[in-house]
Amino acid sequence: MRVIIVGCGRLGAYLALALDKQNHLVTIIDRNSDSFNRLDPNFRGTMVLGVGIDEDVLRRAGIERADAFIAATNGDNTNAMAAEIARLVFNVPKVIARLYDPIREETFRAFGQIETVCPTVMSANKISEMLGNSA
Amino acid sequence: MRVIIVGCGRLGAYLALALDKQNHLVTIIDRNSDSFNRLDPNFRGTMVLGVGIDEDVLRRAGIERADAFIAATNGDNTNAMAAEIARLVFNVPKVIARLYDPIREETFRAFGQIETVCPTVMSANKISEMLGNSA
């Protein structure tokens, strides 16, 4: 699959390597070139410098042929907006946004066109489980 | 169980309510009183103002009788340190630290005394899975 990731923070960089290892064709976008230093030296994908909500930047990253788009910047607003552009403007079939805010995640998911991942809810569920097991 | 949570950010506040609903006795610590505004009005637990790596603050929060301790501030350093104090100084039986950095999480977990939750790894695994299912 051709996968575009927006945001080369911890999640973006980690995911880029993982998907590259699974032989997906990965392009990662970040507005700060220093962020690409987080990428593993073995990463074989493409880096694009720019803002992930700029349609020209997205086109340069090959969004018109992308099979999947992952919005993984540190800002929920940016992720929501980038995901909407990918889904509604460019019709990317699979769009996933990381949203820290559980309430926003629920609302956003209710619209149905974009999938979401909420680290807050996942962490809380995992911790509850870990406590339950020890009780 | 008597549970102490350090950090009333998104995860801390969400978890405090979830554990309270499961009838655990929850005490939540934050150094900024505004953070307690994140708590749901239905939260029945205790709030303690102070720094989660200060032993006096931890004593005030009842750490000497705690069954579990969760370090959930936004700083990996603070979480690692608070978790170590809880485990090594106060012998809390169950100690869990949220660590954003996957490498640090691995290292930390290798020591064995403290359990860890890494939202970065969980999010990446979840996203890989979501892509796999659609492929």
Image (cartoon, coloured by chain):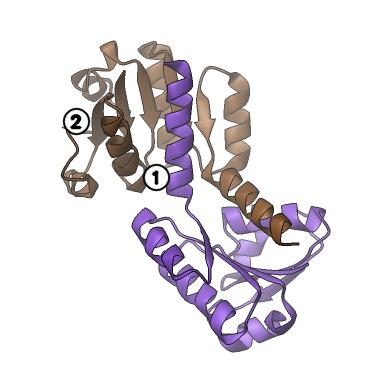
Chain colours: A brown, B purple
In the figure, residue B68 lies in which quadrant?
bottom right
What residue do we see at 31% from left, 29% from top?
A: A22
Residue A74 numbered tag: 1
Q: In the displayed structure, would residue B28 be above or below residue A14?
A: below
Viewed as shown, does residue A29 lie left or right of A120?
A: left
Which residue does the image show at 74% across and 57% down from the upper left? B19
Q: Chain of mark 2?
A: A
Residue B107 lies left or right of residue B30; in this view the side is left
Task: Report if residue B39 is visible in the image.
Answer: no
Amino acid type of disc 2?
Answer: Gly
Which residue, given by chain and number where applicable, does mark 2 sit on? A45
At 50% from the left edge and 38% from the top edge, which residue is drawn? A99
Give the percent coordinates (x, y) of residue A27.
23, 28
> Which numbered disc covers residue A31?
none
Q: Earlier in the sequence, mark 1 or mark 2?
A: 2
Vertical position of residue A11 compared to residue B44: above or below:
above
